[in-house]
Image (cartoon, rainbow, N blue to C red):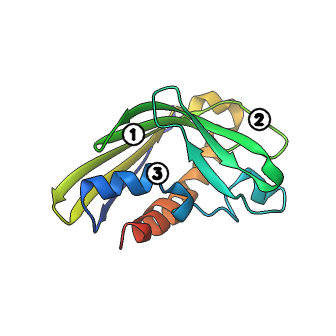
């Protein structure tokens, strides 16, 4: 069993904004030209859509109107918790194994929120589990700790 990825950051905004930026404004901080199915195929994605309800789809809005399923919302609890089954597939592969990503938003005061991202369920990737986990660990450092925090005002 592989250890979960756990990332904790303090963002310089209130809990509501931290949650809203993560869920409603993912397109503003996710690197659409690098870590998307469209980018892997040679063109940046145009956006990300999240159907904000349990069972709702997380969809990459790709180049030329192509939509790619990235995951499914498990828990949508504004403004404290969000979880999703999640995995960005390669361009030639649609829905497959999914990791579990859980994000907790804890308000420290009116201008600071602790955000914890935890990613588990690596075993579903079988022989590729270690490699997939390593890729996400590197990616979250750049995307979550860097771009998401900056989008929150940090």
Q: Residue furthest left?
A: 109
In the image: residue 63, left or right of residue 142: right
* Mark closer to the observer (3, 1): 3
Q: Is residue 113 above or below residue 130?
A: below
For marks 2 and 3 on the same chain, the one whose residue lies earlier in the sequence: 3
Q: Report x, y in % for residue 116.
A: 34, 50
Q: Using the image as rendered, state which of residue 120 and residue 39 is in the foreground.
A: 39
Q: Secondary structure at mark 1?
A: strand
Query: In which quadrant of the rendered view does residue 50 lie?
Result: top right
- On-image quarter of the C terminus: bottom left
**Residue at label 2?**
94
**Residue shown at the point (80%, 62%) measured from the top left:** 43
**Residue at label 1?**
82
- Which labelled disc corresponds to residue 24? 3
Mark 2 residue crowding within 10 angstroms, few (<14) / some (14–19) / many (20+): some
Q: Report x, y in % for residue 132.
A: 64, 45
Is residue 3 visible in this depiction of the protein? no
Is residue 80 visible in this depiction of the protein? yes
């Amino acid at each position: 069993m592989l250890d979960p990825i756990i990332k904790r950051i303090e963002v310089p905004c209130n809990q509501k904004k931290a949650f809203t930026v993560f869920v409603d404004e993912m397109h503003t901080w996710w690197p659409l030209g690098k870590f998307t199915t469209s980018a892997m195929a040679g063109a940046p994605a145009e956006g990300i859509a999240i159907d904000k309800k349990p069972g709702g789809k997380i969809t990459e809005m790709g180049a030329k109107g192509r939509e790619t399923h990235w995951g499914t919302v498990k828990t949508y609890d504004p403004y404290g918790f969000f979880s999703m089954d999640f995995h960005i597939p390669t361009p030639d592969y649609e829905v497959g194994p999914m990791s579990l990503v859980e994000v907790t938003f804890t308000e420290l005061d009116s201008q600071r929120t602790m955000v914890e991202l935890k990613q588990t369920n690596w075993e579903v990737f079988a022989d590729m589990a270690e490699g997939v986990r390593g890729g996400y660990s590197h990616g979250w450092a750049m995307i979550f700790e860097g771009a998401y925090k900056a989008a929150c005002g940090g």
